[in-house]
Image (tube, rainbow, N blue to C red):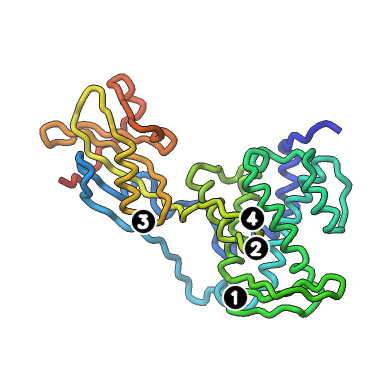
Amino acid sequence: MNAPTFDANSLASLAERTAYEGWLLEEAYRIDDNLVVSPERDHVIFAPDLQLVKHFGYMAANFKLGDWRPGFLEACAPLVFGTAFKLLDMTLEWVLIENGRKATFRFEEKIKAVKDPALVFPPLLASRMWLRERLVALYEQLDPLRGTVIHDREFESVAGGLSVSSSRKGVVGPRVTITAEDLRNLADLFTRVRRYLLGDWQVDAFREKRMRFACDQLAGLHGIVSLGQQSPVFSPVRLYHVEAEPLVVDLDALRDAVRARHANQDAVFDLCLVTLHEGAMVDAMRLLWPQLQGATLTITGAERGALRVLVPADYER
């Protein structure tokens, strides 16, 4: 068999086989790919000397009277856990089928198969060994717990989470705690992997960090060493800069200044660079995070046109 291409027909198969589980988890947790802060809304504003001018905090909330979700998540942790595992199971099973492997209902065989070094994974997973390893480890470690929840009674639903023991082949193992936050992270991670595989959502630096952070939060379940990922935050920045030709921005200093505003977080930001002449705004450019790597940023007059945006309506001296 030729190597799988994970083409449109293949992705349509994945979408169909995971439609219900994906919908339920997204709906129950209100999982979406939108940022709380718009990329066009400046969060941190710095003067030319990188002294803070303003730091805004934005929140998003969605309150609905009679909302079924809190009660559902509190009472139905076993269902949520089973649904999350099933989503992972069908995603990895899809990979096996695309590789020409024989379909089977035996989890031991599927777990062994997804560890095969010869297996070809879709680009999202092929290029991220850290993600693939942790998904496979979660598959292996959660499988006996899923079996208990589905077939036996060696579990309790506690505070929106689970306390469960493997009971495979009649042997009751040690108690494992899966908290409500663990369930949320499992649902969020598996849902994102599905959406990114399908191409419905696009991975960027911030969203990749979110997956890495979720993996770290689940280290107690998959058993693989932490990636050391701090909680990611998207924090658009505005920097006032004195007009010059060319413009040179000290990115190392700018990143340090942003980090100082977000202790114990991993800040990703876009930059609105506002140039000043005799105290008045004369120009504005917006640069995205991938353009803000390296020690310094140099912008010549010829490069400004492609970056130019409207100058901000508000001016903070």
Residue on which disc 4 sits: 224
Amino acid found under the numbered disc labelled 1 = Gly
Label 4, label 1: how many angstroms apart (C-alpha)?
Answer: 25 Å
**Considering only vertical position in the picture, is 159 above or below 285?**
below
Amino acid found under the numbered disc labelled 2 = Leu
Residue nearer the viewer, 183 or 230: 230
Amino acid found under the numbered disc labelled 3 = Ala
Amino acid found under the numbered disc labelled 4 = Ile
Label 4, label 3: how many angstroms apart (C-alpha)?
Answer: 26 Å
The disc, 2 or 1, on the residue closer to the chain's N-terminal end is 1
Quadrant where the image shows the C terminus: top left
Q: Residue at x 35, y 46 (%)?
A: 236
Residue on which disc 1 sits: 160
Q: Nearer the viewer, mark 1 or mark 3?
A: 3
Judge the density around disc 3: few (<14), some (14-19), many (≥20) Cα neighbours within 10 Å.
few
Q: Position of residue 203 (x, y in %)?
A: 55, 43
Judge the density around disc 2: few (<14), some (14-19), many (≥20) Cα neighbours within 10 Å.
some
Q: Position of residue 15 (x, y in %)?
A: 70, 49
**250 left or right, relative to 291:** left
The disc, 2 or 3, on the residue closer to the chain's N-terminal end is 2
Q: Position of residue 278 (x, y in %)?
A: 10, 33
Q: Secondary structure at mark 4?
A: loop
Q: Secondary structure at mark 3?
A: loop
The disc, 1 or 3, on the residue closer to the chain's N-terminal end is 1
Q: Residue at x 20, y 26 (%)?
A: 244
Judge the density around disc 4: few (<14), some (14-19), many (≥20) Cα neighbours within 10 Å.
some
**Considering only vertical position in the picture, is 10 above or below 77?**
above
**2 and 3 marks in contact (CB < 8 Å):** no
**182 left or right, relative to 248:** right
Residue on which disc 2 sits: 221
Q: Residue furthest front?
A: 225
Label 2, label 1: how many angstroms apart (C-alpha)?
Answer: 17 Å
